[in-house]
Image (cartoon, rainbow, N blue to C red):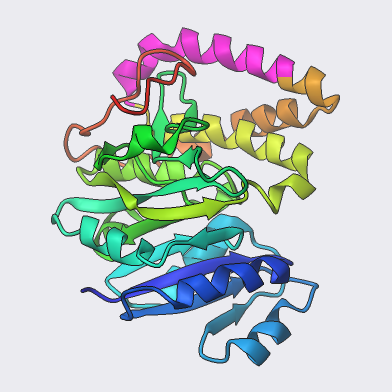
Amino acid sequence: MLKTTVIIVNWNGRSWLQQCLPPLAAQTVKNFDILVVDNGSTDDSIMWLARNWPDIIVLPLEKNLGFAAANNIGIRATDSPLVALLNNDTLVDEGWLEALVTAVSPPQTGMVASQIVRWNQPHLLDSAGIQVDRAGIAWNRGWGQPIELAAAPCPVFGPSGAAALYRRDMLDEIGLFDEDYFAYYEDVDLAWRAQRAGWTCHYAPDARVRHWHSATANKTPHYKNFLNGRNKLWTIMKNYDWPALFWAAPIIIAYDVMATVYQTVNSRNLSPLRGRWQAVRAAKQMINKRQPARQKAPFSPLPFPGKQPPVAT
């Protein structure tokens, strides 16, 4: 099997690493390295890793650069043909990595999505890959549904960055995560760029992971709303085909206005509005990042905003 580097971005997550690393180290395949990129933690994560996991490669950063930049640093620091990303708030099954590597065998498969289940409700899905609709809204496919409905492998739009496998050849072609995003929607943006370049993503149900959703982000909910609102619009600007965007623009604008009002009122904070405003201010910069579509993407956005089809279809 091709060698894989498993990259874990950590920020003050020593307690999560204590649970995450033992099952990861016990994988059925052994041809992999573990790399922890520490995002300027102020807890004892680095010392704990040195003391308890001396064989793990640790890249300490001086400050929190965000999910996108930290993963990029990890990817650039390695040369393995495959790169797996794993959140620190996860528990992997022993066959997780083997299932991912097996699924990436077809040459045009550049991404593999794990079956991610809820930490405290492992019979329910957290993600069976990601999907995007015509309003540019991305969601975790199958979220909250029974795992039995996602038992079959199938093509999907992209993987959740919480537990994903990427082919390095694909990343060399389309580029890494957009570091301007900091966090959120960077996995959607990368998957969309990959689809536009003709790469595909496969969902591997045997690559099973338990995930405590947003364990780090829950500490800063207003900033999460800011990033999600901004990065969603940036992703549309960078990836939506212009003719399709012309027809979808009324849907996108109407839905985003409603979402902004709802989030602002519900959170009693202006962060959702500020995120959209920053997205508009940087529109030219994002449009200049657009990559030409090399061929028609195998996946197009789904028709209805936020309407999730049954995961089994």
As drawn, 169 above or below 162: below
As drawn, 159 above or below 282: below
Using residue 99 as the reference point, say whether residue 69 is left or right of it.
right
Asked if residue 243 shows in the view, the reply is yes
Using residue 312 as the reference point, say whether residue 2 is left or right of it.
left
Asked whether 144 or 222 is in front, the reply is 144
As drawn, 77 above or below 94: below
Asked whether 6 or 183 is in front, the reply is 6
Q: Residue furthest left?
A: 107
Query: Residue at the location (26% across, 63% down)?
Result: 101
- Name which quarter of the figure residue 298 lies in: top left
Magenta span: 241-262
Q: How many marks?
A: 0
Using residue 293 as the reference point, say whether residue 88 is left or right of it.
right
Q: Position of residue 306 (x, y in %)?
A: 49, 18
In the image, residue 246 lies in the stretch drawn in magenta: yes
- Name which quarter of the figure residue 118 lies in: top right
Asked if residue 162 shows in the view, the reply is no
Of the 4 image quadrants, the one containing the N terminus is bottom left
Asked whether 164 or 248 is in front, the reply is 164
Q: Position of residue 277 (x, y in %)?
A: 68, 28
- Name which quarter of the figure residue 254 lies in: top right
Q: Position of residue 234 (x, y in %)?
A: 52, 34
Query: Residue at the location (24% across, 37% down)?
Result: 293
Q: Position of residue 171 (x, y in %)?
A: 32, 59
Instruction: Considering the whole magenta stretch, tell me its main secondary structure.
Output: helix
Query: Residue at the location (33% across, 43% down)?
Result: 193
In the image, residue 63 lies in the stretch drawn in magenta: no
Query: Residue at the location (65% across, 39% down)?
Result: 227
